[in-house]
Amino acid sequence: MLLCTLASQNEDNYVQDACSVTHYQDLCIHTLASFSHIAKHSPSRWARAGVSVTIAEAKRVSKYLKTNRSGMIIEGRNKVALLDCIECFIDTLDNLHKSLGVLRKLSFRDFDSQMGDVTTWLSAALTDEDTCLDGFHGHEGRVVEILLNRVSNVTCMTSNALALVNKLATTGPEALQKD
């Protein structure tokens, strides 16, 4: 019984350590706790995990946005904002997928260039998410409020993923030895 408790504490420490660099630490810990036994002290594994969970959540939100579009729940100016937001999320998912693709094949030789690309794409994803949110500025209604909360959650997760990637970048290619 004691071994199980110690293992759980170590895993909690791994995720808390990894998430210490993020702006939304509670969200980070909640979304990445299941990766502790795999990622441990590996900055590259934490970065991949951060981007992976963000992709999953962005897909759920994108599906939600498309459901609202086809369900005609939102009308008028909100409908235009929703259509723009759907386009933004297509770009967000593209940038997240490109980031994960590079994170999966990091190399010592191209590390700095790869990190530059990934941070650029994650920053672009954040911009797209902010653009989506801006489209609903001043709009009201329960559906809009739910939509804004879901998009904001993805924005927070993207911010956390970017922080984990920045931690990896500052660690340098030596971080790849911990994989």
Image: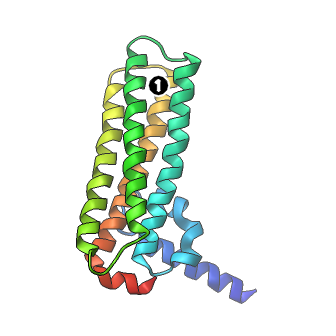
Question: Can residue 120 be seen from the camera position used here?
Answer: yes
The one nearer the camera, 142 or 56, is 56
SS for tag 1? helix
Residue at the image point whose x is 59% and y is 19% from the top? 71
Residue at the image point whose x is 50% and y is 37% from the top? 62
Report the side of 1 relative to 10 (left or right). Answer: right
Q: Residue furthest right?
A: 1
Question: Can residue 26 be seen from the camera position used here?
Answer: no
Residue count near mark 1 (Cα–Cα under 10 Å), binned few <14, some 14–19, many ≥20: some
For label 1, the residue is 144
Q: Residue furthest top?
A: 76
Report the side of 40 relative to 165 (left or right). Answer: right
Locate residue 53, reporting x and y percent. 51, 56
Residue at the image point whose x is 56% and y is 77% from the top? 38
Up-down: is 74 above or below 93?
Answer: above
Report the side of 36 relative to 151 (left or right). Answer: right
Locate residue 100, reporting x and y percent. 42, 61
Up-down: is 107 above or below 74?
Answer: below
Amino acid under disc 1: Val
Locate residue 115, reporting x and y percent. 28, 67
The one nearer the camera, 58 or 146, is 58
Locate residue 96, reporting x and y percent. 40, 52
Specify the color scheme.
rainbow
Count of numbered tags: 1
The one nearer the camera, 5 or 45, is 45
Up-down: is 91 above or below 175?
Answer: above
Residue at the image point whose x is 37% and y is 64% from the top? 102
Quadrant of res 153: top left
Q: Quadrant of the N terminus?
A: bottom right
Report the side of 31 relative to 113 (left or right). Answer: right
